[in-house]
Image (cartoon, rainbow, N blue to C red):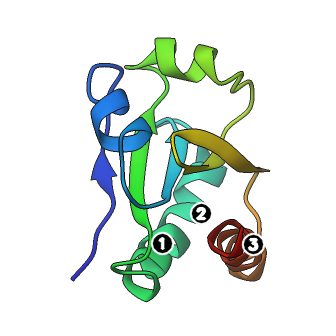
Amino acid sequence: MAHTMEVTDSTFDQEVIKSDTPVLVDFWADWCAPCKMIAPLVEELAEEYDGQVKFAKLDVDSNPQTAMTYGVRGIPTLLIFSDGQPVKQVVGAVPKSVLKKNLDEALAS
């Protein structure tokens, strides 16, 4: 059963950049209502893409360095990394279909 894992500034490189599989990173904060709206969708996708994509969450308040590195200015921001590089970006609370489309495109490339 796949779940999203928490990543931090100190674990980001190991868990995301060096990952053999694509990784969707959800940049969020506890006070962010749209972040809480999208969280269940990210969990559902973690189940659907189990074994194909890793799913991670990064709290921007506790881990500002990584958010700054990738130019995250608004949350929720979801970045899809492949081979250590961000290949797709989704900003805001979007429908699950939009997230699936971006994941499928990232997997196809």
Q: Is residue 62 left or right of residue 86?
A: left
Q: Which residue is mark 2?
A: 37
Q: Amino acid at mark 3?
A: Glu
Q: Is residue 62 above or below residue 22?
A: above
Q: Residue at x 28, y 53 (%)?
A: 5
Where is residue 109? Give x, y as percent. Answer: 72, 67
Q: Is residue 11 left or right of residue 104?
A: left
> SS of the residue at dot 3?
helix
Q: Is residue 74 visible?
A: yes
- Within 10 Å of the Cα at label 1, are there few (<14), some (14-19), or many (20+) other Cα atoms? few
Q: Amino acid at mark 2?
A: Met
Q: Which residue is mark 3?
A: 105
Residue farthest along the left direction in this orientation: 1
The N terminus lies in which quarter of the figure? bottom left
Q: Residue at x 50, y 20 (%)?
A: 66
For the residue pair 81 and 79, the one nearer the viewer reads as 81
Q: How many marks?
A: 3
Q: CA distance from mark 1 to mark 2?
A: 7 Å
For the residue pair 23 and 72, the one nearer the viewer reads as 23
> SS of the residue at dot 2?
helix
Q: Which residue is mark 1?
A: 40
> SS of the residue at dot 1?
helix
For the residue pair 66 and 43, the one nearer the viewer reads as 66
Q: Are marks 1 and 2 in contact (CB under 8 Å)?
A: yes
Where is residue 94? Give x, y as percent. Answer: 77, 65
Where is residue 65? Give x, y as percent. Answer: 49, 12
Residue farthest along the bottom direction in this orientation: 48
Q: Nearer the viewer, mark 1 or mark 3?
A: 3
